[in-house]
Each structure stands twice: as C-alpha cells, then as structure tokens.
Amino acid sequence: MNWSIVFLFLFLFSLVVLIVGTKNPQTIFPKSNVTRIRFFLASLFASFLLLSLSIAVSPATEKRESLNDPTPTPTQLGTEAPTFSPSPTNAANRIKTKILNVIDGDTVKIGDGKVVRLIGIDAPETSKGGECYAQEATKRLEELVLNKEVELEKDVSETDRYQRLLRYIWVGNILTNEVLVWEGFAKASSYPPDIKYQDRFREAERVAREKRLGLWGSACAKPTVKSSATTAPQTGGSYVCNCSKTCTQMSSCTEAQYQLNVCGCTARDADKDGIACDADCQ
C-alpha cells in the first residue's frame, strides 16, 4: 500500500473538515460546546500532522520501489577487468563436443572425428623434429581440453585450406586459445577474417613476452651470431684460408685456386675469369 497517498488524502479531507467546522463546530460535533477557535486550532494541527506524515512516507516508498527495480545500477554496469566469459549471444552460437585427441599445441580432434584448428594463435610445430617448446605446448593443451566436454565457437570461416574446422574452444568460461598465448605456449597469429578476439590475443602475447614465459623465455632464445671484420682462418686439407697472401706467396697454383674458390679471396682473380693468379698459373 502507498501510505503517502493515504496520508495525502486524509490531509485534503482534514482541510474540508477545517473549513466546515470553523464556520459551525456543531456541524462536526453536534453534542459538543467546542468553540470555533479550539476547533480551528485542533483541525489545523491535525492537517499539518497528516501533511508531515505524507511527506515523510514518500521517500521511504520510493526507496523500496528502487530496491525492487530490476534495472542494473551504474555500479553494476561499471567497468570491470576483462574475463574469459563470452556474451550471451556468443554462448548461444557455441556447439558442445568432446576432445578425443590433441594433435599439437593448436590442433585437436573432436568426437565426430573432425580436426579442429584453434583460431588466432600459432603454437610451435611438432613435425620435422619439433620446434622449440612444441612438446610443452601440446602437453599444456592436453591438460586444458583432452577428454573434456568443451564448446566450439565459430568466427567467420568454416574451415581452412586443409579442411580443418576453425574454432575458438571454450572450457566453461575459459577461452583456451587465449590461455595458451597468455602462458607462452603459443603466439598470437591473425588470420583474417577470423579476428574476433585478436585484440585479446595480442594483449596476452604482450604480457607473455614481458614476463618471458614459455617460448619467449631463454630456452627458445636464438643464439646471436657475431659478425667479424676479418675472415676466420679455415682449413681445407693442407691449405688454410688467408686472403692476405699474394700470388707469389702461394705454395702452388692449386693453393691459389683454393683461396679463390673455397675461401672467396677474389683479389687473386683480377680479370674475373675464374682462374687464380693468371700470370703464374696459365
């Protein structure tokens, strides 16, 4: 019940009683000797009391109504840290299946025997001897999805050129593609037009790089080759590469040709005819 309306109605009614009773108190109290002044003061007090109650009750009623209002408040709609949870629309477009086999760090086989390639990421290859961190990436994907009920989400493309299904893999509210990049088991790799979560993957890679996780760590760091201004001596049978030797210093024409062909000492072939030290070896 809305008590503010009730008290407001009583207040208006009291005004009518006040006006009528002030003119003739016996109209309201026929058997009483109440004077006009007393009746006026009593009625006026009652009117103000009812008006005060009406005003006091109104905010409380509004507060109760606001608490029952299902509309989210600004606090509920405030910005929150990104999560792995998809929107309701995305959830409606996902298909449930079971992962039967993990082929490598970004490829799995599902219940109907079809192969699924995870969209937006690229894990190290296990073929041809295996790239650095390939086995670790495969093992991590097994931990995340193998023999589990998952949900597949399509982006734009149905399959790739190898007829593998292109999908995002959700385990509950966890986007597996993103986890692999976040933990350093895969790189963010854009394959337009399937780029729905690419911003998230790039951010995950940035974090993994900064923390030097997984394939960004020292285990997979490529050795740096230092360049040298001088050619390091190379041996070949009884000869040693030394481009500073002149033709007169060569032990034989065979050595001169070795210095040209093997060591790349082009100064020994001034006329560029492929024969070293022409003057001495023709």
Image (cartoon, rainbow, N blue to C red):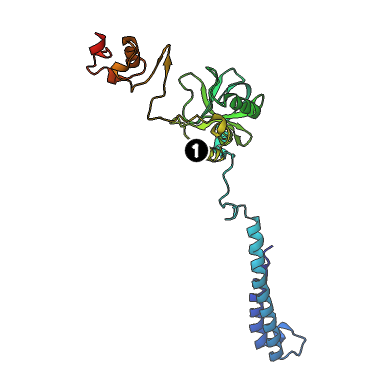
**Residue 26 or 221: which is nearer the viewer?**
221
Q: In this view, does 122 lie above or below 112?
A: below
**Residue 271 or 8: which is nearer the viewer?**
271
Q: In this view, does 212 lie above or below 26?
A: above
Judge whether residue 145 can be spotted in this image. yes
Q: Residue at the spot x=67%, y=61% of the render?
A: 64
Residue ranking furthest to the top: 282
Residue 4 x/y as whole percent: 66, 68
Residue 49 x/y as whole percent: 69, 78
Residue 253 x/y as whole percent: 31, 10
Horizontal arrangement in the rendering, residue 240 relative to residue 12 (left or right): left
Q: Is residue 128 above or below residue 35?
A: above
**Residue 248 or 174: which is nearer the viewer?**
248
When asked about the image quadrant of residue 85, the answer is top right
Q: Residue at the spot x=55%, y=36% of the render?
A: 90
Q: Residue at the spot x=74%, y=89% of the render?
A: 34
Quarter holding the C terminus? top left
Q: Residue at the spot x=58%, y=49% of the render?
A: 80
When asked about the image quadrant of residue 28, the answer is bottom right
Crowding at mark 1 (Cα within 10 Å: few <14, some 14-19, many 20+): many
Assign a secondary structure to mark 1.
helix
Under mark 1, the amino acid is Arg
Quarter holding the N terminus? bottom right
Q: Mark 1 points at which residue?
A: 202
**Residue 87 or 136: which is nearer the viewer?**
136
Residue 129 x/y as whole percent: 54, 18
Q: In this view, does 279 lie above or below 216?
A: above
Horizontal arrangement in the rendering, residue 7 relative to residue 243 (left or right): right
